[in-house]
Amino acid sequence: MRKTLETKIKYILVADKIYRVTQINFVNLIIEASETDLVSSDIPAEELFCLSDFKEFKVKFRNWKGNIVRFPGVER
C-alpha cells in the first residue's frame, strides 16, 4: 500500500498567475500544477508558494486546456 504524504503545498504563484498543485513527487522532485482563476486573497497564505521556492524541482504548468505552459525566462 502506498502512503500519501500530506503537504501544505497547494498552490504556486508564477507570472502573476496562481496554479493549483495536482501532483508532487518528492522522490523525483517533480511538481505538476494546473491554471486557476484564483487570486492570492482567495488562498490561505500557508498554502501559496512562489515558484522560486522550488528551484530543485522540475515543475510542469498546464493551462485550462491541459497544454503545458512555458514562461519566458523560467526554465522548468
Image: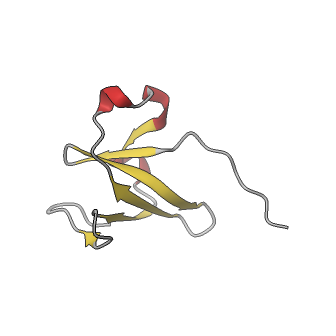
Residue at the limit of the structure toward the bottom, as seen here: 67
The foreground one among 64 and 6 is 64
The residue lying at 60 percent from left, 60 percent from top is 26
Mark count: 0
The residue lying at 26 percent from left, 66 percent from top is 75
| Quadrant of the drawing holding the C terminus | bottom left
Residue at the limit of the structure toward the right, as seen here: 1
The foreground one among 49 and 34 is 34
Could you tell whether 71 is left or right of 1 in the image? left
The foreground one among 3 and 65 is 65
Reply above or below: 52 against 27.
above
Could you tell whether 19 is left or right of 2 in the image? left
Quarter of the image holding residue 34? bottom left
Could you tell whether 56 is left or right of 19 in the image? right
Q: How is the image coloured?
A: secondary structure
Where is residue 56? Give x, y as percent.
45, 59
The residue lying at 28 percent from left, 73 percent from top is 67
| Quadrant of the drawing holding the N terminus | bottom right
The residue lying at 40 percent from left, 40 percent from top is 49
Where is residue 48? Give x, y as percent.
41, 37
Where is residue 43? Give x, y as percent.
40, 31
Reply above or below: 48 against 17.
above
